[in-house]
Amino acid sequence: MESLTIGIIGIIAFFVLLLIGVHIASALAIVGALGLIAILGWDKSIEFISLTAFFSVFRFELIALPLFIMAGVVAALGGLSRDIYVALSKWTTRFRAGLGMATIASCTLFGTVCGSALVTASVFAKVSSPQLRALGYPKGLAYGVVSAGGMIGMLIPPSILIVYYAILTEESVGKLLIAGISPGLLLTIIFWIGLWVKGRLNPDLFGAPSMTHPTWRERIATLPLLWPVTLVAVILVGGIISGVFDPNEAGALAVMVILLLTILRIRSIKGLIPSFKEAAAVTGMIFFIFIGGTLFSRFLTLSGITPVIIKWIIGLELSQLGMVIAMCVVYLIMGCFLDSISMLSITIPLIYPVIRTMKIDPIWFGMSVIMAIEIGLITPPFGLNIFAVKGIAERDVSLEDIFRGVLPFILMSLGVLILIIAFPTLSTILPNLMMK
């Protein structure tokens, strides 16, 4: 049987496995390994598979991944998210949608220590959504705000998804992390503006207006609550931009700071054990997907599928802009059915050689598709942020309620995606400053 035929059969088998419910990591690994055996033969493939699996995760750049995961999980345990929300809510009560705006800002700040959209959304579903409902926010909007806010945590550093993309594409982890700052802040600003406009046009939607407003003294008194997250943000972002730390060193130092602060707060080292277990479980899952994705990528290359796809796409004669738009549309559709890491694992081995051949800026492409992937986290029918938030919400809150509440944020996110695609400088300005 020809290698190309084996490759086509392998792709069909992969999607069949997904449809019958096999986990993405197992599906990638099974198809990749069996495909390599079919092409190379048993003797050659066993050594090739074992070495590929080992060296796919035995990489210096991957050290940052478990560090960022640990930082986010421990920060959530230590109550850092609640401090951020309490402080920022004092500064936004004068606005009609003030607590919603405080929630978005809190997700942004918490995102500087937590690189997971799911963790960010889940944490603030516990911290802020009950307070939003108590104030009079519709239940869908109260949980839609945190579902959308979680997206920001996967854009600004330390983003787990950006690190994963960087490893898959062999691009600079540091430059890609810094590139996420501008899109992340832009998304925050657009969400703020959207809530503010909605508060002006439909004030009754945000419950009864607050009869009292904090004084400037009370607002300033909350600023010490923000110093831990500010310190971590300076270490991570400032250290990487300035070149003082690489992403691994910045992640290690940030974890040390968060661990010390959390131990001082909970006064127990044993209390950290659940966080260690959760961080290890998440890291193991991601590494397993990475091993499977690498095997699948090697199989596609050896089968000849990847070169065929490259020739076919180049034959379409798309411009660089057209190619980026086309891929973003693909990711928006896939986001309705798959999680972020799975989408990258399936598509990057196929499409990234084309991106290199077409000489598309890898940072601009990366930020565009990551934004498109993030929108998938809040789109029906399988938006993972929505499901994570639903698992925490009160019993009277349905998936339909949350999807209805998050709809305006989907539209705003699409607007941000258009801006990122139309103006590549939004993604490349900070990484270019690093190079200088």
Image (cartoon, rainbow, N blue to C red):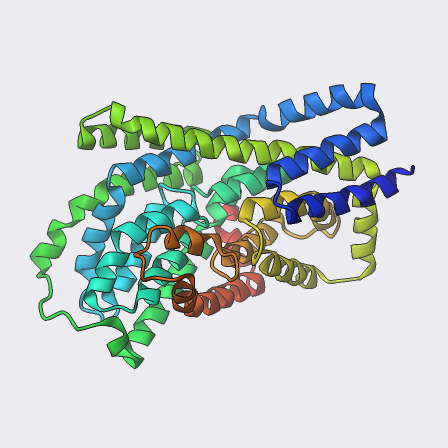
Between 42 and 305, the one nearer to me in the picture: 42
Question: Which residue is outermost to the bottom?
Answer: 201
The N terminus lies in which quarter of the figure?
Answer: top right
- Position of residue 320 in the picture relative to residue 200 (left or right): right
Q: Where is residue 119, by image quadrant?
A: top left
Between 412 and 249, the one nearer to me in the picture: 412
> Residue 183: where, in percent of width, then height?
46, 56
Residue 119 makes an appearance in the image: yes
- Position of residue 9 in the picture relative to residue 414 (left or right): right
- Position of residue 358 in the picture relative to residue 249 (left or right): right
Q: Residue at x 29, y 28 (%)?
A: 272
Residue 65 makes an appearance in the image: no
> Residue 408: where, in percent of width, then height?
42, 70
Q: Residue at x 38, y 65 (%)?
A: 191
Q: Residue at x 81, y 43 (%)?
A: 9
> Residue 232: where, in percent of width, then height?
31, 38
Q: Residue at x 20, y 58 (%)?
A: 89
Question: Which residue is outermost to the right?
Answer: 1
> Residue 177: where, in percent of width, then height?
48, 43
Total labels: the figure holds 0
